[in-house]
Amino acid sequence: MRPTLRCLVLFLAGIPLSLGAVAIHARLWSVWFAYVCACVALAGFDAVFCLAKRKLRVAAHTPEQIFIGESATATIELSAGRRGAALQLLAELDPDLAPQPPISVEVRAAERGQPARGTAQVRLVPRRRGSHALRGVHVRWSGPLGLIEKRRAVMVDRKVDVVPNLGAVRAIALRMFADHNFFAGLKVEKFLGDGSEFESLREYVPGLDHRAIDWRASARHRKLLCQEFRAERNHQVVLAVDGGQLMSEPVDGVPKLDHAINAAILLGWFCLRTGDRVGMLGFDERVRQWAEPAGGMHTFQRLQALSADIGYRHVETNYTLTLAELSTRLRRRSLVVLFTDFLDTVTAELMIDNVTRLARRHLVLFVAVRDPSLETRALARPGTMGALHEAVVASDFARERHVVLERLRRAGAHCIDTAPATFSMALVNRYLDIKRRELY
């Protein structure tokens, strides 16, 4: 319990009153004494009729989990006996949950004789994955005259798990694969004739490729027959996610690592639905997580659990060790989707060399998250010398980024460098194009 600013102003207002009274006559010092007694009486009245701390009850309810990149709300329930009050509360959150401003709540009784109740909604905006918590609630309120203020801290320790975002996977699943007939038609019509796996024989008609004629079967049936092919469905896809220090940097409020994990989960689900075998590699200075490529939709749960274990590590990524170990673990040609990032051409030299070596045996899809603010600063019209320097540096970084990506393309790797808003769908579209063209 402590005096408010209004109480201090009330006491300080008596100073010119007492000085004026003493200036008129020395015996009028009692005016100051009477004024102080009146202020003390008002403050005591406010303290007596202010809501007692023991009557305040606080309960918190949080969601079980939140998808990274989204937000949720925690409900704070307040009870103040039969006497209402105007409360101001501040939620104490973990550092990986964005701080929220104070919230004002009016606690009033619905009917006379019933306890006064009120609720408040606190936004939970996660910055990183993991297990976070709403630690406590700090509440303050003042008396009827606003002279005395009371405070109370209530520890609630309500935990909430921040997990990879599966919302995109669910939305696309409902839109594209809810209709079984649509899914079957898409698979048969889209990939028939584009693959390398034998499908059937059909009678030759003008316009078909002469190289597809099966002369032995034509001789047996005494008519020209052509072979039809379909796309293979048992390819290997490895999702290699970099958890080094560069991937911990936020882009649009979410770390690059979480953008990569969300896209990797979506791509893994697509690969499993199209019949491919999917594995996952989590690495930074060494290999942290590894799952052998496997088929079937039951593999998706394993990929989801494994991706949640990829943590934020402030270490330099070792491409030489991790990509060499990946090459030894893969016994057949695979599509390696590499989620990573780089700064400039100097720091990317080792990465380019090892990706080039990996691309000689496997098909590499290099995926990076582009920071939209870099392009915005490079193209902005500078108004000050500081803004000019930022534009020059951002332009240099953008040019060097383009040079690195061009070197990777010349080495045989497919590259994706796009903003987070189109990151996941650009990856899925590139995978479907690679699968249609039978590049791996």
Image: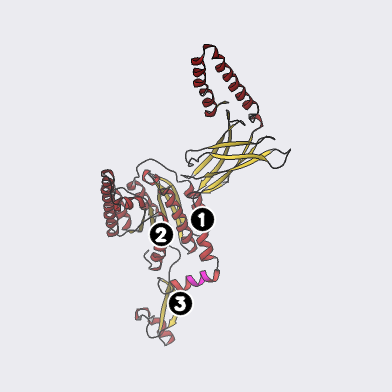
CA distance separating discs 3 and 2? 32 Å
Query: Can residue 45 be seen in this snapshot?
Result: yes
Q: Which residue is mark 3?
A: 200
Is there a contact, CB below 8 Å, between mark 2 and mark 1?
Answer: no
- Vertical relation: 403 (above or below) 86: below
**Quarter of the image holding residue 338?**
bottom left
Most foreground residue, 332 or 193: 193
Q: Which residue is mark 2?
A: 427
Query: Can residue 371 be seen in this snapshot?
Result: no
Is there a contact, CB below 8 Å, between mark 1 and mark 3?
Answer: no
Quarter that holds the C terminus = bottom left
Q: Is residue 383 magenta?
A: no
Where residue 119 appears, as percent x and y from the top left, is 62, 42
Mark 3: amino acid: Ser
Mark 2: amino acid: Leu
Most foreground residue, 376 or 385: 385
Mark 1: amino acid: Gly
Where residue 101 appears, as percent x and y from the top left, is 50, 40
Q: Which residues are magenta?
A: 182-186
